[in-house]
Image (spheres, coloured by chain):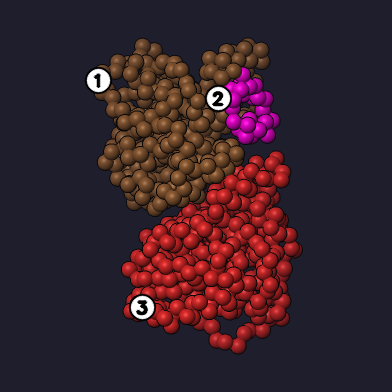
Chain colours: A brown, B red
Amino acid sequence: MGKTWTHEPALISATEASPPALDRDDIDRAAGQLRNRIWRTPVIRSDRLDELAGARLWLKAENLQRGGSFKIRGALLAVAELAAAGSRGIVAQSTGNHAIAVSLAAAAHRLPATLVLPANAVPSKVQRIRESDAEVLLVGSTLADRLAAVARLRELHGYDVLDPYENPHVVVGQGTATSELLDQVAEAGGRLDTVVVPIGGGSAIAGACLAAAGRDVAVIGAEPQNVPAFTAALCERQPVTVVPQHTIADGLRPERIGDLPFELAHRSVAGVVTVPETAIAEALCAAVLRARLVIEPAAATALAAALSHATGSSTDIGVLLTGGNVEPGLVASLLTDRPDEAPLH
Amino acid sequence: MGKTWTHEPALISATEASPPALDRDDIDRAAGQLRNRIWRTPVIRSDRLDELAGARLWLKAENLQRGGSFKIRGALLAVAELAAAGSRGIVAQSTGNHAIAVSLAAAAHRLPATLVLPANAVPSKVQRIRESDAEVLLVGSTLADRLAAVARLRELHGYDVLDPYENPHVVVGQGTATSELLDQVAEAGGRLDTVVVPIGGGSAIAGACLAAAGRDVAVIGAEPQNVPAFTAALCERQPVTVVPQHTIADGLRPERIGDLPFELAHRSVAGVVTVPETAIAEALCAAVLRARLVIEPAAATALAAALSHATGSSTDIGVLLTGGNVEPGLVASLLTDRPDEAPLH
């Protein structure tokens, strides 16, 4: 596991584009708009994961969220905005969860939707989108492939594009998950010193940074060692495209961090942990066997970072378990082929 | 799936032994004693299970409880009582979860414990007991085999017996799970008309009946079609030993309902659903794939009853997901060998 990468905020200059001014008030407003439209998912404790982590873990179980991931939060807000503006339909690209969320949100507004996913998208995620009557286009393997397809579809249908990284409603919506986690821990009499969030395109970490602002909690990102797009962006002080190697964390495959998320997160994030594939797999097994939670590999990447002691002297670590949309066959094979049964079970 | 069996309370006479007078006040007191010693496990909602059930399900996730099942509730209360009375050690028989719970509770009081399980006990449950330094004796396959071993060990060591069915602290403790469920649904602005609880030795259903008293909620039991011990007891108006066939619901293998649970439950229970093995397996898959929860087959038996529409016109059904201590290989094989993938996923 890569060591915690702690950047020096002073060394990183602001990007030139002027991003939307977002802050914690936007998160609070969004939380109000989402009330009764999503589940207030529980924060789950597990003695047997705490043992592994050497700290108290507070697991925000967005794997139990509507649509199977926290992405419904941003999608509901953004689609409502587009619908109110008279949208004729939505087109969006995604590795899967944003697409599921957009398809559900569009269906709620009776808007047609076309979702662009990579050809290697997880079959169960594709099936889930089709169940909500949205169209699915599987194309290429890179972010660039998908963005090109989105541009064509926008032209063809006159649909609005709902970008998973650059749309401020999406980022703010995703941030409500971390905000809710912080509130729930406080309600339970606890206090987090650290929150760990997985990084794909960056909306989760950007939302977490917004939600944590002024709350004296360190936000740590976790990304696959095989797709270190945020680590690379921090090094280069701007989003860069990395050459991705294969990761089971299909939700974290975007090979470039979004501009808006980078802008919002790069000054506030306390560090990034790059997680090897074996640790992602082990964390997924630990969630199933120790905490009885089915999570997807993206969520397991954050859990792996928390279990790795990479968060240093933290005593109370919030972990954003972003989703549970995992291929049943992957769970079955991980449970069957665990290299070392004893420590995990 | 067997039809809901609704008994006529007037037809069933009281058993002759005079049982301890237990009521809802005992449950409330027990809940106070357990505060901060167990997790207040969440009540989880799932649109995709509601679709299958044709009703709103409120899942009390005791699979996320300390020790992996609701049995820690009764064990903590009963062991505290024995410890206060100067116990030298505890001996208990169980198909698994009561034994895990007793081993944890005994360890908390630094009391030695010996647990008697059937030879076909689930290996991961046995391992879990050994991890807490308790002794495990695997013996025979019937309840009678285990009770004989318990009697010998009691004599040999001078230990106290902590019976999983006849001990009133155990029954009251298990009842706090249902009581908490009813409270949590009310806090969320809902109201249950039905609670479904799995039946093994009977402590869950007896506790549920105590907890539901005066609350205008029907308590339904669910037991494997292959071990219909409670259904048989209701027919005979007293506990009887049935000839058990194999069930994957290892926690529901006791072939006879306890006297105390029968006494407490037989007048109050609104019905019993007998669940075929295929439905138990399907419900377990549905929990994993639709609700992202790892549950054991005993809990899946209650879920299966709720999904089967056997609860009639109920609109809001509480389901006591009693535990999550399932063999990883069973989950893997169920996920791999699903006869019909589409409807469950």
* Residue drawn 52% across the image and 37% down it: A296
Judged by depth in the image, the label closer to the viewer, 2 or 3, is 3
Q: Is residue B183 left or right of residue B231?
A: left
Quadrant showing the C terminus of chain B? top right
For the residues marked 3 and 1, what is the alpha-carbon distance in whole angstroms? 64 Å
**x and y percent of residue B140 in the render?**
57, 71
- Asked if the residue at tag 1 contacts the one at tag 3, i.e. Cβ–Cβ closer than 8 Å, the answer is no
Nearer to us in this view, B228 or A333:
A333
Q: Which residue corresponds to the image point at 60% horizontal and 15% vertical from the top-left?
A: A149
Circle 1 residue: A10
Q: Residue at x 53, y 14 (%)?
A: A144
Specify the quadrant of the image occupied by residue A76: top right
Find the magenta span and give its range. Answer: A112-139
Task: Answer yes or no: is residue A333 visible.
Answer: yes
Quadrant assignment, res A58? top left
Helix, strand or loop status at disc 3: loop
